[in-house]
Amino acid sequence: MEELQKINRRNFIKTGGIASAAVALSLNSLDAFANGRLQKLTILHTNDVHSRIEPFPMDGSRNQGLGGTARRSALIKKIRAEQENVLLLDAGDIFQGTPYFNKFGGEVEIKLMSQMQYDATTLGNHDFDNGVEGFYKQLPHANFPVLIANYDLSNTALSKSTQPFKVFKKAGLKIGVFGLGIQLKGLVDPKNYGETQYFDPIAKANETALLLKNDYKCDLVICLSHLGYSYRNNSVSDKVLAANTRNIDLIIGGHTHTFLDVPEDVKNLDGQITTVNQVGFAGINLGRIDYYFEPFKNKKMKVGTPYLINNKLDA
Amino acid sequence: MTVKNKIYILAISLVLLGSCTTKYAVVKSNREEQNINSSLPVDSSIIKTYMPYKVKVEAEMNEVIGYTDVVLSKSSSLPESVLGNFFADAVYNQARKIEPNIGFVFPTTTGGLRNDIAKGPITVSSIFELMPFENQLILFNLKGADVLKVITNIAARGGQPVSGLKFNIKNKLPENILINGKPFDVNKSYWVATSDYIAGGGDENVGFATPISSKNMSILIRDALLKEVKEVQAAGNKINAKLDGRITKN
């Protein structure tokens, strides 16, 4: 089950040579920045908010005073006022964790996400806690899509309520976003997930990301994953997914409630960067990744070109 | 249409076509996590949305039902935790009132302990946050071999919240097993209470698939916790859970 983890970032330096190579190679690309041709996209993300509507109570516990939808919303509004192109994404486990869920079944959580103008979410295992029907019941309050590429829900109440991916257009940029869920068997009571069928996330990810890159001509492909950051055993995780797929630029993870000091950059099957990030749980943090894009026309993109990575925002 | 116009239109079309096929490559990525804490302003429109729900929830949830003299914390470097022992003992006490022959209870996993409880008053909300799930308590009559499977799995996982059970973990295997203070006998059968989640194989638990018999005790595990805290309070006492070496690792 979920464990709080604090990942030592020194491991990242050892395995993350790909990121330092990027720093050395891509500075020239930033000529476009001076020319004003760069497009900027801001990704904001949460995971495992677990019905934490209000900040943790001031009771001496570890996370006292942290989180809260009112503050998160204020921060999101401030960023939206400053940035033209914003995507707000969630990686699942919206439900379960405070009496708001026990009493109102997720209505408050979904209403608030709609009010904050979330662009998409995926399904976490706890989103099945009131059964497939329990999630379905709250969907009238959602004005954002539920993305899941590796569950077949066609024999369930959610048969018409989810989609594998969505392509967002922001100022000429095309951003493909798809969702992946964890194996429910053994994790969720079978009566709650019913006839939901699970498919291999790596195969589905490769299939979906290729479609988004090649057919939909997406400039950036993002995976919303509820698989978990990393496991000691061979279970599929975001790190395993990143290393065994192509065409995914960013994996926004969840499930393991992992606090990362900085996102992790993994070398994918094409030798390109697939970034994995997760921001703990309960809305304690809001993840932010700004991507800068340079346009190119009528010339082949340099495959495998690394890019500049900073673990802070531009001033 | 003049030739000049045609060329003009062609030129425009080419530009349009070009703009449609414009591709972008990432040249830079900046990342920075933003902590959500009291330094941030609040969006009052969000509070306005949840306030009607908050009023209803709080009326029920803020009732103080007992007190704890110690922090009930999940954090532990040992195979047991204060919070796990409180949880398991509370369920054991309530389950024994329904079925006095219970050997031990294994009502949740370490991962299922969802929130610590601070020293001081315990509210209904504290218990809901600790145990938000709607799991039922199920009673099993298990063959000794199946009991051993259950305990072996608990040992392999480095301990879980249990009550009525005592053993040592050596090389990830259980030894010196005591059930209700008596040495475990693999040839005997035992009454074990657990959650429907664990019994169903949740979190990779084993041993409950082929019981001699089983029955639903018709009590939510959370309700057992609420009842125990209220009863301790009614008796004029406070919760005082401790680490007692029920599971050791040597």
Image (tube, grey):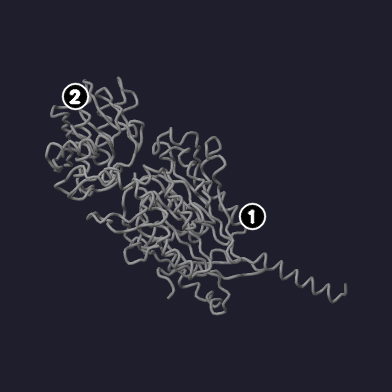
On the rendered structure, is B249 left or right of B112?
left
Which residue is more in the foreground, A137 or B248?
Answer: A137
A200 vs B31: above or below? above
Name the secondary structure under disc 1: helix
Which residue is nearer to you in this view: A251 or B196? B196
Circle on res. A153: none
Of B218 and B105, the residue lying toward us: B218
For the view shown, which residue lies furthest in the right direction?
B2
Identify the chain of the residue marked 2, using the numbered disc in the image. B
Q: Secondary structure at mark 2?
A: loop
Q: Amino acid at mark 2?
A: Pro
Residue at position x 27%, y 35% from top? B223
Whole-percent x, y for residue B24 in the image: 59, 66
Residue B50: x and y in percent read 40, 53
Q: Which percent across, then down, holds residue A87?
A: 50, 61
Q: Is residue B230 above or below residue A5?
A: above
Q: Label 2: few (<14), some or many (≥20) within 10 Å?
A: few
Task: Same chain for labels 2 and 1? Say yes or no.
Answer: no
Residue furthest to the bottom in view is A34
**Amino acid at pointer 1:** Asp
- The residue tagged 2 is B100
Quarter residue B20 falls in: bottom right
| Residue occupied by mark 1 | A215
Quadrant where the image shows the C terminus of chain A: bottom left
Quarter in which the N terminus of chain A is drawn: top left
